[in-house]
Image: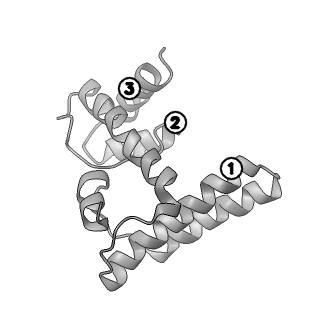
Amino acid sequence: MKISEYIKEYTNGNRVKFIHILAECKEFIDDVLRLNKMGMCEEFEDALHFLQLWLYWRFGLNGEIWKITRHSVDKFIGRKSVWNKIYKFVGLPENISGYVGNYNKVFKVVNHLNKFGINKEKAKEAHNKIILGK
């Protein structure tokens, strides 16, 4: 899959900035300090994944997704169906966004749904029901 196809289908379309790569690098360093080998591998791939997205936005490099980032890309792609369930739960169209942020973090669900006018309580309710199964 080309980066432009991935961006269209699995992101909210916002430009990836270098700060996003640095955020992933910070998560990698946190896992290094915790000696969390699985976390290190995951965050290293995420950093490379965001690097490739940044290269597309910054320089227009529209190559195939790098094989080294395949697990990271698959993780993000897998999140889309869960986000579609969250959107439906709060009364939004299922495919309103390609956003595939980490729905396990309630603040990310609240912040993202707020962009569509969904209040904090309804967003937390969606998180509890869809993610936590409460």
At which x and y percent is residue 16?
Answer: 39, 70
Instruction: Specify whether residue 101 is in view.
Output: no
Viewer-proximal residue, 57 or 62? 62
Under mark 1, the amino acid is Gly
Q: Nearer the viewer, mark 2 or mark 1?
A: 1
Alpha carbon distance from label 2 to label 1: 16 Å
Q: Nearer the viewer, mark 3 or mark 1?
A: 1
At which x and y percent is residue 73?
Answer: 43, 53
Chain-order first, disc 3 or disc 1:
1
Describe residue 24's horizontal placement relative to residue 91 as left or right.
Answer: right
Residue that carries the numbered disc 3 in the rendered image: 126
Q: Secondary structure at mark 3?
A: helix
Residue that carries the numbered disc 1 in the rendered image: 39
Describe residue 3's horizontal placement relative to residue 69 as left or right.
Answer: left
Q: In the figure, residue 96 lies in which quadrant?
A: top left
Under mark 2, the amino acid is Asn
At which x and y percent is residue 50?
Answer: 47, 66
Q: Secondary structure at mark 1?
A: helix
What residue appears at the point 51 percent right and 73 percent down from the top-left corner?
19
Labels 2 and 1 touching (C-beta < 8 A): no
Chain-order first, disc 2 or disc 3:
2
Instruction: Specify whether residue 37 is in view.
Output: yes
Residue that carries the numbered disc 2 in the rendered image: 104
Residue 7's label in the rendered image is none
**Quarter in which the N terminus is drawn:** bottom left
